[in-house]
Amino acid sequence: MPDPIMSARGYQSGSEGSDHHHDDDHDKHFSSFAEYIDHSKHDPEKVVEVSPNGRYAKLNSVLGKGAYKIVYKGIDREEGYEVAWNCFQTTKQEYAELSQEVEILKRVRHPNIINFHDCWYSNTEFIFITELMTSGTLREYIRKLQSPNLKVVKRWCRQILKGLIYLHSYDPPIIHRDIKCDNIFINGAHGEVKIGDMGTAKMKIGKKYTVIGTPEFMAPEMYEEKGYSEKVDIYAFGMCLLEMVTGDYPYNECKNAAQIYKKVTQGLKPECLSRIIDPEVLHLIQRCLAPEHERYSAQEAIEDPFLGVEPEVVVLTTNEAKNHLTLQVVFKGMDMLSVKFEFNADTDTAEEVVNEMIEEAVLPQKYQRYITHDINRILREMAGTGDKKDNAGHVPSSPMPQNGHGLPGAISQLSLDNSGGTASPIPQLVRAASDLNRKNSGSEWTTETELPFKEYSLDAPIEDLVNDTALAYHRGPDKAEEWLAKLKNQDIMTIGDLRDLQDSDWAGFDLTVFASRALRNRLFGKSIKRPNPLTRNSSGGTTTDDGL
Ligand SMILES: Nc1ncnc2c1ncn2[C@@H]1O[C@H](COP(=O)(O)OP(=O)(O)OP(=O)(O)O)[C@@H](O)[C@H]1O
């Protein structure tokens, strides 16, 4: 039988070394078996232990050591990915007392919290398997980047707070108790930040150097031993933010824990706080370090102006005439949150479209002014592009005032001026408007109210609905084609297929908010409710439905 070690690791004696091995050891030549054994002891990929259920393997590679635990690289043999194998010295009795906490930890699942996969007790050690983080801790990163810029700091803070919001939303809240930059881990490639060292705070009680938490990051109420709440994590987060922006460990002016204790209980803040000049950062830190009853919750902290998400509207596509735009509201700093919609510069106004999306709860009300302003900026820029081409001198003095049809007033004026001249070098936006006016007066275009409501049979092809909808909402055949393709991509072929869908299914079609709603409204026989600023009732509600 071949020696399992030798065959597994490809031992080659000096003279017999073959060149057909291609793993890490392959190019190494050992002069003796003893040398090979010695090498394999240091081989970081060597499996040195296996979990009782056989799923996890511990490798011969230490990722790091803390005051309480040693962390090794491990492998999840079922899924084939690397994990962190954590070894924590404790008694079986203590381990047994943790069983309830462990069950909770197994259920904690959040993108900003390191996953806890499994645990067991073996030979004086509590062993637990967690997600492996590849780029070390936030503290190491701060040292590496010297002083990270505020954009990066904001991104980190949002992620940490999202994790805390999640933990604190449990009933009773899960309190981490040891938030600090060493317990926050980074995955470098995507700048992903996750809270780690979950659940070990309790285990550290009764150990030699017992404090729950780390003195510099401990809120005053933690020293008082009168009980504390999840707000201690926010205090610690405030200290982390202080470290992120100053690069200094808080209270590094203190020589020992006793000095820190004295300062904290007297309400004296770390010296490095006085170096912060940015008023927004300072405000957030102060709200996190405030006495417990005045301190931010995690939710309040993430909504602080320093971290507030800034929506930005970007143009995804435009037609040649630049009057049919596909726009997207992107929330900088919020992963994945964006809203895509179509905008018809001839018939829509920024105000109406934004109001509509707020009514439909697609956008939060608080961004109304911001997004409206940004859409208007885009429209102005579009009109501006046209201006450059307008060497006939038809430059709108102010392209943005809106007329009742949502067309920038000065532009619609211009379109009338140019209605007869096809060769006139009018702005593209203006030319499109005049084209549309002409189409609307003929049979090619119509408004929805002119299309009678139609009951589609269940086996009718979706083309019927899509084409009618595009026609009703002034969208051209290209749009109809686009919508059709997206539906057919998901195997939607007939009206019956569409009628069976849930709201969540519609969300998966990659249709714009507008397209999705227009199709549904047509299918279920409703008109889109659009607030008309000209006919608001006294209570500020909407009285009309202009049928668009
Ligand atoms: N999930 C992980 N992925 C990668 N490395 C890790 C992971 N968890 C811990 N480490 C590494 O192991 C080291 C020790 O872990 P940690 O600091 O959590 O130990 P501890 O004894 O619980 O902590 P402390 O000394 O802060 O109380 C960390 O500094 C880090 O380098």
Image (cartoon, rainbow, N blue to C red):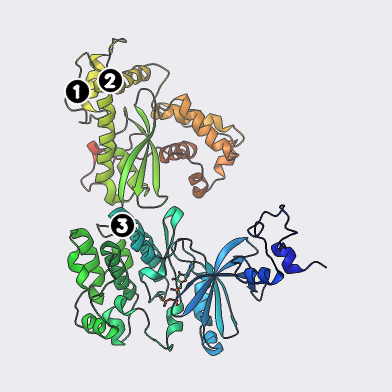
Residue 70 picture location, percent across and down: 50, 76
Quarter of the N terminus within the rendering: bottom right
Q: Answer with left or right where residue 383 lies relative to residue 503.
A: left
Q: Is residue 51 above or below residue 335?
A: below
Q: Residue at x 66, y 76 (%)?
A: 52
Q: Are marks 1 and 2 in contact (CB under 8 Å)?
A: yes
Q: Is label 1 in a helix, a strand or a loop? A: loop
Residue holding disc 1: 396
Residue holding disc 2: 427
Q: Residue at x 62, y 72 (%)?
A: 41
- Residue 295 shows up from this direction: no
Query: In the depicted view, which residue is nearer to us: 396 or 205?
Result: 205
Disc 3 or 2, which lies upstream in sequence? 3
**Which amino acid type is shown beneath numbered disc 2?**
Pro
Q: Is residue 87 above or below residue 504?
A: below
**Which amino acid type is shown beneath numbered disc 3?**
Pro
Q: Is label 2 in a helix, a strand or a loop? A: loop
Q: Is residue 527 above or below residue 245?
A: above
Q: Answer with left or right where residue 2 lies relative to residue 450.
A: right
Quarter of the C terminus within the rendering: top left
Residue 545 picture location, percent across and down: 33, 37
Disc 1 or 3, which lies upstream in sequence? 3
Q: Residue at x 25, y 35 (%)?
A: 377
Classify residue 302 by image quadrant.
Answer: bottom left
Residue holding disc 3: 148
Disc 1 or 2, which lies upstream in sequence? 1
Badge 2: residue crowd in 10 Å (few <14, some 14–19, many ≥20): many
Tell me how far mark 3 sits from mark 2, CA to CA.
Answer: 45 Å
Q: Ligand 1 quadrant?
A: bottom left
Q: Answer with left or right where residue 485 lies relative to residue 476.
A: right
